[in-house]
Image (cartoon, rainbow, N blue to C red):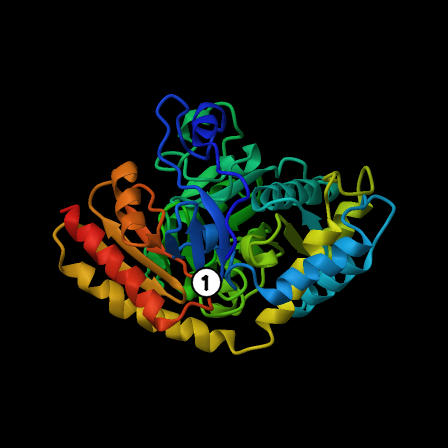
Amino acid sequence: MSTSAHPIDLDFDRSHLWHPYTSVKNPLPVYPVCCAYDVFLELEDGRKLIDGMSSWWAAIHGYNHPVLNEAMVAQIRRMSHVMFGGLTHEPAVTLAKQLVALTPQSLQKVFFSDSGSVAVEVAIKMAIQFWAASGKPSKKRLLTVRSGYHGDTFAAMSVCDPITGMHSLFKGSIQEQFFAEAPSCLFHEPCTEEDLADIHSMLEKHHMEIAAVIIEPIVQGAGGMRFYAPHYLVRLRELCDCYDVLLIFDEIATGFGRTGRMFALDHAGIVPDIMCVGKALTGGYMTLAATLATNKVADIICSGNPGLFMHGPTFMANPLACAVASANISLLGSYDWQASVVRLEAGLRKGLTPCRDLSNVADVRVLGAIGVVELHSPVDMAVVQKQFVDKGVWVRPFSRLVYLMPPFIMRGEELEILTAAVYDVVKDAQ
């Protein structure tokens, strides 16, 4: 592959660029990427890294995929962007058709936005506006579970874990929501009434204030990489119906096959009132997300004051993003992606299970194309990141979690290198 025409100015980067979750006074090292293809990131110095993160879970088909490249090229020749207010275009209509066909039948309305965090903001606004239009304006707070993560914008922060999450600093500045204990029933375990006792109690006491329950189905992502029982969602749906509360599923991290089903909700066979998707929607090519809602939610919102939904991003339904998202979904449907995820699950389980014997490991868990090694203590990011790069892999741990979310196209030998690197680095950290 070709390298950068001009060397990357790392001194300027260090002095002026503010990277995510880093300090400008003591920035972590960054590694200059000149190109990416297949499952590889190529650094400016020529080293190739096997990407174990799918660029924060988004690049499910790897990089520089010819089908997705062609979709972008074809679309940019026609139109790169046009406002979505008062106009429409074929990429948005086609993508919406695909999303309506892929998701549960009752989710019929599609609202496009810029990112996963904004999709959550949209979902929360929908829930609040739904109850205002229903004549119940007191229902404006959210209920969620601890150890969750839903994004970095203000409403999204308010439903992230308030104690152990990344946004505890903003307590008092954001809306205070209701938090119940996280599901304790593991993925392959039955769910008991005791597992739901806390959230049941919250609904019973506060349902007149609660607009919606928002939850990451089956997998709690950046809040702890925890997997829980599908039956929990079945009972949660029943409780929401009983107490007249909407149910929002945040499928941003889990959607498009990551857990072994197209959406994590498919493990439980139940349907939310509102659902957020993002990340893998475009295969990692463009920033795009969507919030889907039932006809009932949309109709009631639009029958109340002011008779419309109050949101409209500038780059909503960007044609380039919609075109590549549509091609990405078609690509996913063109091969047996489920078999690929089953293969990855087996490889992750085989490669990561030896970590259980290490003294600094609290747990090892695998579900679909997600592999997690949970440590007893947080990692030293600067040290661990360099160790992974030196071993020829890209793995980005956080806190006590070293995890893998590889592209679906990853081959067995590359997955073996990835999991061996995790074992070696975790072993060295003992």
Determine whether 42 is above or below 122 in the image.
Answer: below
Residue 73 in the figure: left or right of residue 177: right
Q: How many numbered discs, if any?
A: 1
Determine whether 5 is above or below 14 in the image.
Answer: below
Look at 49% across and 70% down and name the residue there: 261
Determine whether 396 is above or below 7 in the image.
Answer: below
What residue is disc 1 on?
A: 407
Residue 376 quadrant: top left
Look at 45% across and 70% down and name the residue there: 260
Please tell me whether mark 1 sits on a helix, a strand or a loop.
loop
Look at 43% across and 60% down and name the residue there: 218
Residue 28 in the figure: left or right of residue 379: right
Determine whether 402 is above or below 342 in the image.
Answer: above
Position in image of residue 72 (x %, y %): 69, 57
Which one is nearer the viewer's eye here, 247 or 167? Answer: 167
Position in image of residue 389 (x %, y %): 32, 48
Give amino acid for label 1.
Pro
Position in image of residue 19 (x %, y %): 46, 33
Residue 75 in the figure: left or right of residue 203: right
User: Quick one: which residue is furthest to the top in this view?
Assistant: 25
Which one is nearer the viewer's eye here, 292 or 426? Answer: 426
Can the viewer see residue 313 in this picture?
yes
Position in image of residue 78 (x %, y %): 81, 55
Counting other residues with Cα less than 10 Å from the Cα at mark 1, is it few (<14), some (14-19), or many (20 or more)?
A: many
Can the viewer see residue 348 in this picture?
no
Which one is nearer the viewer's eye here, 282 or 175? Answer: 282
Residue 239 in the figure: left or right of residue 391: right
